[in-house]
Image (cartoon, grey):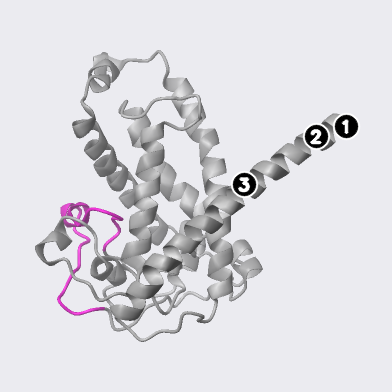
Amino acid sequence: MGGLYHRLAIHAEVFAYHVAQLSVWLILLVAIFVPLEKLFALHPAKIFRKQIAIDLAWYFINSLLPAAILVIPLSILANALQGINPWGLYSKVALFPLWLKLPLMFIINDIGAYWGHRASHTFPLLWRFHAIHHSAEHMDWLVNTRAHPFDIVFTRLAGLTPLYLLGLARSSHAGIDPWVALVMILGTLWSFFIHANIRWRLGPMEWVLSSPAFHHWHHTNDEHRDHNFAAMFPLVDRLFGTAWLPKEWPPVYGTSTKVARTLKGQLLTETIPTPKRED
């Protein structure tokens, strides 16, 4: 019994450490985005808006739970691929210099995540979870965290699995390839930026890197919905015919699908009577 209490105490300490880490990151994010959204606001908005408490809860849940879940399938996949070298592919990829390997990882991850994201808009069961993210009727940086853990795990697996299958990511003692971890961290930070309520445009660079304008159009709730699925590289949407980036900004955000207004309701997707998208 004493051993059990000892293990529980260790897990509690680790959990508290991660929560403390996330609290520090949250303070940094607030220090960056709150002033930016005040100085360069696209739409007038209050800091303490409706559902901010729920989105803060999602911030902690989705910073802890999906990462813990992803370790399992990615570790299994990496271990299953050990010792396999189809057509000498993995040996060749292992020789790639970092300046080539890392951009390839970002691009391939974005293509895989694109199709996972697009599937979430196509298949009713996946949309049942993804609709939570689209329920925001006003955009700001914290909306990035409003998502069901299942939705995050599914989309990230869609992006990260090709990295392992192509030999760009391998197993490590930490469970996840450190370069994969870097791709996830930088991708998450960029996601906060593209959800932000700031009126910045990137000019010609908007077709190279996703911008707030590019991603805001993904959240529109008019006839231009279901565009701009790529998280980082708009050229992926152009390649597959789903890009939409006019000079103006979206007139309306949100979704016609009914989504619960409580954290429990969103977690259980309890107010969506059928897994059918309403257009």
Is residue 192 one of those drawn in magenta? no
Pointers 3 and 2 in contact (CB under 8 A)?
A: no
Decide if residue 124 is in sight here. Answer: no
Q: Secondary structure at mark 3?
A: helix
Badge 2, how many Cα within 10 Å: few under 14, some, many 20+? few
Tell me the tag on residue 184.
none
How far, Cα to Cα, is label 3 from label 2?
A: 17 Å
Q: Earlier in the sequence, mark 1 or mark 3?
A: 1
Kind of residue indicated by mark 2: His
Question: What residue occupies the far bottom of the structure in this picture?
Answer: 44
Q: Which residues are magenta?
A: 228-249
Q: Is residue 44 left or right of residue 12?
A: left
Residue 56 x/y as whole percent: 55, 66
Decide if residue 171 is in sight here. Answer: yes
Kind of residue indicated by mark 1: Gly
For image coordinates 16% across by 66% down, the residue present is: 202
Q: Secondary structure at mark 1?
A: helix
Kind of residue indicated by mark 3: Tyr
Badge 1 is on which residue? 2
Q: Is residue 51 left or right of residue 176?
A: right
The quarter in which the C terminus is drawn is: bottom left
For image coordinates 58% across by 56% down, the residue present is: 61
Q: Quadrant of residue 224?
A: bottom left
Badge 3 is on which residue? 17
Residue 142 x/y as whole percent: 45, 68
Is residue 230 one of those drawn in magenta? yes
Q: Earlier in the sequence, mark 3 or mark 2?
A: 2
Q: Nearer the viewer, residue 177 or 153?
A: 177
Chief secondary structure of the magenta span?
A: loop
The quarter in which the N terminus is drawn is: top right
Pointers 1 and 2 in contact (CB under 8 A)?
A: yes
Badge 2 is on which residue? 6
